[in-house]
Image: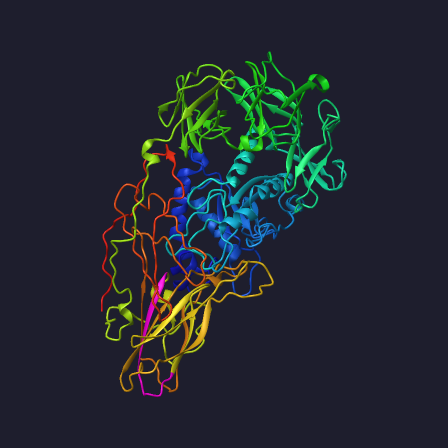
Amino acid sequence: MPHWVTAEVPGYLRANSTSYTEAYLPYWKAIADVTVKNQITSGGPIIAIQVDNEYIQPESPGNPGKMGYFEDLQKVLREEGVVIPTTYNDPGQMKSYAQGQGKVDLYGLDSYSNGFDCLHPEVWQPVTTNYYEYHMETNPEQPWFIPEFQAGSLDPWGPAAGYENCRKLTGPDYESVFHLNLWANNVKLVSYYMGYGGTSWGHIPFHKVYTSYDLGASISEPRQLTSKYTELKRQGLFIRSAPDFITTDVIGTTANGKVNVTGASVFATFLQNPATKAGFYIARQLDSTSTATVSFGLSVSTSAGPLTLPLSSSSPGITLKGRQSKVIVTDFTFGSSKALYSTASILFAGKIGSRDVLHLYGDSGVEHEAAIKFKGGRKALKTAAGNGQGIVQLQDGPSGYTLIKFKPTDTSGVTTVWESDSTLILISSADQAGSFFSPAISGSGTYGNFWQFGSKSAILVQGPYLVRSASVKGSTIDIVGDIEKDTTLTVVAPTSGISTITFNGKKVTLSSGAFSAVKGIFVGKIAVSNSVQNVKVPSLSSGWRFTDALPEIKSKYSDDKWTVATKKDTNSPYKPYYGDADGPVLYGCDYGYCEGHVLWRGRFTASGSEKAVNLSINGGEAFAASVWLNGKFIKTTYGKSTYPAYIWPILDPALEETDETFTFPAGALLPGKENVLTVLQDNMGLNQTNDWNAETSKSPRGIRGYKLIGADTTFTSWKNWRASMWINGWLMGRVVGNLGPQFKFPVHEGILDYRGKNTIALAIWSMEDAPVSVSVKIEVDAVYDSGKGDTKVIGANEKWVKRLEG
């Protein structure tokens, strides 16, 4: 919501009030126009549109018209030509807009089950266990949708944990347990918040968080891949490989006796495709926070009859290594082949060319088991290092299936269990599996880039840091991606028709060896280019120019061009506390200054008895405000954030406004003359709208109270202005020195010109009457040789505009 709306709209926000409708309608119609052109029925990628977010349905006292607002939003979309389903994200299990007035087409909710305490990332909350039951009583006729599921955590201002700790709180083990718990509850659509958080550049951040919006996401703010990305990729490739999992019924759990396991510490859910009878048993520890390693047996139903897994009498059982979940499949189809069951995880299942390919994986040093009907003549076991004997054992299984037992290691690489013209079975450790990508090969027609509809063809690629795409042109597969070091490229491709591999347009010299001897597998070396190896960054230790960033504090500064504060009332429900009897409201956004630093200058003629001024200043969490009288510094007042966020009871509340007395320094007051009081304050961003009341976003950022102390003197005028810091035309960082925690700011290509001139400007605000020393340097996190192509630089080196002068 743009900040100006909170000041200029007298009616209720996020309601069907006339003034708010007039404010949002041009924006909403523009969104509809973009959506119409890009919805799935027009060949685009958009399959649904969310009309609003986290806003409960029941009408609230003092905030009527919410349900009518939802109706209006959807009516506009339909009038403008949007035909895809409308959706909504409920802030919890509240059933808002699942039924009744304002109902959307596809209901969903958000969930942050693990909380936000990144200071203690090892402390988990239990998984939510009633998602499925809630779905069945709320909207069973719809697919179960979680539009916003926790995939990170916010980190407030202050001596906070930092986003690396948030990445640990929601790391790969969290993804394994919490994500698969959604699967077990039959969730079929999910959006993770966030896959990539990025940067809250400019003045758009919510006031509780700092510039970085990394959130501990799978892709870090500097756009580096993390171990969370690797686990998310493994999960995503399984979902893509398991079309039978798209439609499943929940048959039962260990809690209701529908699933039997050995050992009381394991909880399992059985889901089954009603048409194909493919089964999916999802197991975790009953205490989802447990870090113990447990092994168990599982009774399953298969087309070959009931079985107790693992079948091998020498196996210790199916193993959960602490905080981990597993999917055990039965009657699982890959291409035209079938696995009777697998206690190993599945990375890839499907066809590559005309061959059925299955890639199984599991924890290193742990025994896994699968039963598969092989096709064609089997060739010798092979690994990237050579013979696969000792890693894999094959023996006869039930009903003509072959039983595969394997215990992978991270050093053994990938093992070929079965190779024929019709079937390829690969196994590896989980870490090795995580190093693979499976880019889809585009099909033809309108939906050629859409998996399942226009493309069902993919390959497997191992070696690059990132694989962006792959395409087939004649007998050549061209792979586009990034590498950070010289590496071995391995491509699992069709068994016929392919003879050449290129990487970023360069032909790969293919090598011979045990693994490359497997038909359809190509192996070669790719190297980082010399230009990338020798990257150097400039020093910022010299060449700086500086100027007085606050000429406004001087008493002789002319503010004739400034906005005069004249408003006697405000649309904010948070009215001024106190002030001169007929004085103006001093809220920045009421005068068009809605973001960033705001300067206020108040004048009064002194009698000589004035000793101080009482100011109540509101700037949001972690704000600050400095005050001068006639150019002489008085002091700075400080807000603060609270840690951890959204965990109750709050032991140390945040301060988004302060009320303090500013005592005039000796000699600062000019009796009988006009005196100028200057206030420089932060606006750290607005409050969120509460789930039950949107008016909370009309934050009173500014001066909520002002009163001279020692005399009945009143201010004759108040004026305001603002200042900001920009880098190449973009504000990319705000430092709060007394709180932190962020002192390093990623600046991405496109903002920063990697091959040209850049301008860095720093506005340094000293909070106390003491010198401040600041050092600035460029750091390189990593260097990648990338095939992404050139990046357009937007806004860099725009013409500098001179600020107002007095």
| Residue 581, above or below 377 | below
x and y percent of residue 218 in the render? 50, 42
x and y percent of residue 679 in the render? 35, 71
x and y percent of residue 369 in the render? 67, 26
**Which one is nearer the viewer's eye here, 554 or 97?**
554
Q: Residue at x 54, y 66 (%)?
A: 653
| Residue 404, above or below 77 | above
x and y percent of residue 421 in the render? 54, 13
> Viewed as shown, does residue 107 lie left or right of 31?
right
**Which one is nearer the viewer's eye here, 522 or 70?**
522
User: In which image quadrant can residue 547 be found?
Assistant: bottom left
**Which one is nearer the viewer's eye here, 167 or 15?**
167
Figure quadrant of the C terminus: bottom left
**Which one is nearer the viewer's eye here, 24 or 76?**
24
Q: Bounds of the magenta span?
A: 596-611
Which residue appears farthest toward the top when viewing the image? 377
- Asked if residue 623 shows in the view, the reply is yes
Q: Residue at x 59, y 44 (%)?
A: 174
Figure quadrant of the N terminus: bottom left
State yes or no: residue 39 in magenta: no
